[in-house]
Image: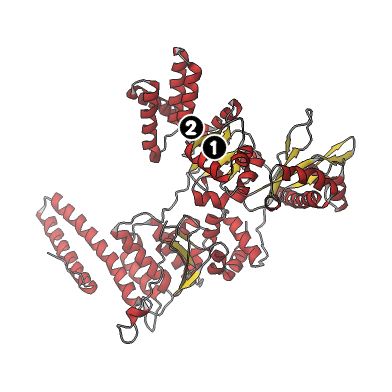
Amino acid sequence: MITQNTIQQILSRIDIVEIVGSFVKLKKRGTNYIGLCPFHNEKSPSFTVSAAKEIYKCFGCGRSGNSISFLMEAEKYSYAEALRWLAAKYNVEIEETETSPEYKQQQQVADSLYIINNFAQKFFTNALFNTDEGQDIALSYLKQRGFREEIINKFQLGFNPGARDSFTKEALANQYNLEYLQKSGLVNVRDGNAYDNYRGRIIFPIHNQSGKVLGFGARIIKNNDKAPKYINTPENEIYVKSKLLYGSYFARLAIDKADECLLVEGYTDVVSLHQAGIENVVASGGTSLTPDQLRLIKKYTNNLTIIYDGDNAGIKAALRGLDLALEESLNVKLVLIPDKEDPDSYINKVGAAAFANFIAENKRDVILFQLDIALKDAGTDSNKKSIIVNQIAETIAKINKAEDFTKQQDYIKQCSEILKIEESGLHALVNKFIREKVTKAENQSYREERNDVNILPAETVDDTLSLFNKDEMHERAMVRSLLEFGLKDWDEEQKVANYIFKEIELNQLEELIDNKDLVHVVQTYKTWYNEGIEPTPKNFLYHDNLKMSSLVVSIMDFNYEISPKWSEHFEGHIPTREDLFKEEVFSTLNYLKLKKIKRLMDENQHDLEKSLISEEQMILVQTHQHLKQMEIELTKQLGTVIFK
């Protein structure tokens, strides 16, 4: 939706050192910058940023990318959110393409709700700290609960005064639309009179991944049997409860770094744990986990630890959504807080260190815990035990992704031992549930096709850290030469790009390069070059095709630097890749030609073995000799020895 003109303005201002330096302490080393990787724990810096190439790479965990992908990784932004963050940083006004009237209306409502929520948050915070009622009732209550002012400020907690319409009057006086105030859940209207919905309550703002306030949770202070303990924002254009986890904005970096997400029920649980220094924690708000919430967790980590009260209600809440978590390939553990405590009260009781130790020592596998609880409930009832076997088999069947095969087999082994049944029998039962699920999915797919529903295939993700075979390494080397040196002069008449394209035309691109994604990069370069658009590496690094961008990042090398002491052993200038670019271009093209010739020789040999006609055999032998001579010539140019 953001115009290309805006994107180009943003890209022209980007300084990767400045952007990454906002999150990582960088130190200049040679032409590059180094620091401790923000994506994994390390003591020695292996995270390198190249200002010249505008890319980063961690030589410890392997993560790499550009300024936009860094924001997407570090802040868990979408591509569009990262662009908006950069636009705000560099004061670039965002232009957007024309949209439908319906979408434009929806966006206007969403923007209005964000503005109202921002105003409300400031009003509630001011009421908490700067009014007598807020200080005497709400702030004293929070401090009595053990919350310090710095944590109250961090989470932007507030207070809605007890008067019937104190917030409503202020909002209307500031020209906020009454219809949108109602939609936000902050104001109710009855009998033509508008009044505050959260009066007399402590306010917990709920933020999205970029820190904007989506809605509020409002907790009652005084005991009132008729009033609910918490009131939450009703669902609207920006607040969808099933897609939110309280505290995720404040926890995202800590979860990523710890590679574990702690899940609790309540707002105060999150705030208390953060205050104690345990920041990789979010709250579900007491609802069953939804697929969207689980995917939000999975953006940061595959390891989920649920921390709930140890009573029956807490156990049931912890087990809700278990199957969904397993289907998302999350490694789920469970910790139950003892002595009728909740995480908030327990950490205040025992302290942060003891709480952390308790969590580490009392994690239980959720499937085995579920089995244990069910068996205790069944006792000696064989019918109930039979039901349990089926339930456990169905649960294990949810773990059916290829990468989780070992985990699934381990569960079958452990559960069959606990249930005292044949492992092969449980294995067969698990497979039965998997087959039923596959059959159901196939039937659903068939019905959708019959109804002419277009089903888009899932987008494949390029793994830039995978191991490449030798041929692909040569293909990547040639593309890297094109990207880095294509605009240099090959001779007085042509650029490097012209020379490469002539050689490619003679040998056919698809026969030189097998990787279709690399072919797409070369074709895109040629299109831009012919259209007069400067195809610099930067244009590829920030291409809106994220798969192409990721691929280009993965093939761009960091410049090697010569040690000053090593330089002392040489007189004069030590040649660099920049100095030897012609040799590199020439050799990378010749390696690909050599690969093509070897493939043709293999095909020719295969035809020779099958041929029974002497004339054909003679032609094939001559063809082999011709290809062999071409191979010898190329290897001489490359300085390679071929054994006959």
Q: Give the residue displayed 46% in from the left and 58% down from the top.
A: 550
Q: Secondary structure at mark 2?
A: helix
In the rendered structure, the answer to whether residue 560 lies left or right of residue 246 reads: left
Q: For this rendering, which residue is in front, 35 or 539?
A: 35
| Image quarter of the C terminus | bottom left
In the rendered structure, the answer to whether residue 52 lies left or right of residue 225 reads: left
Tell whether label 1 touches label 2 (CB within 8 Å): yes
Q: Quadrant of residue 4?
A: bottom right
Q: Quadrant of residue 574?
A: bottom left
The vertical placement of 29 against 244, above or below, is: below
Residue 351 image point, x, y percent: 59, 43
The vertical placement of 513 against 32, above or below, is: above
- Residue with the most extreme left position: 614
Q: For this rendering, which residue is in front, 549 or 175?
A: 175
Instruction: Say which label, 2 or 1, has the lower sequence index.
Output: 1
Real-space Cα distance between discs 2 and 1?
Answer: 9 Å
| Image quarter of the N terminus | bottom right
Q: Residues within 10 Å of mark 1 (few under 14, many from 20)?
A: many
Which residue is tagged 2? 366
Mark yes or no: residue 162 visible.
yes
In the rendered structure, the answer to whether residue 576 lies left or right of residue 289 reads: left
- Residue with the most extreme right position: 192
Which residue is tagged 1? 306
Q: Quadrant of residue 368?
A: top left
Q: For this rendering, which residue is in front, 617 or 428?
A: 428
The vertical placement of 292 against 18, above or below, is: above
In the rendered structure, the answer to whether residue 29 lies left or right of residue 169 reads: left
Q: Give the residue displayed 34% in from the left and 24% down from the top.
A: 423
Mark yes or no: residue 530 visible.
no
Q: How is the image coloured?
A: secondary structure
Residue 258 image point, x, y percent: 50, 49
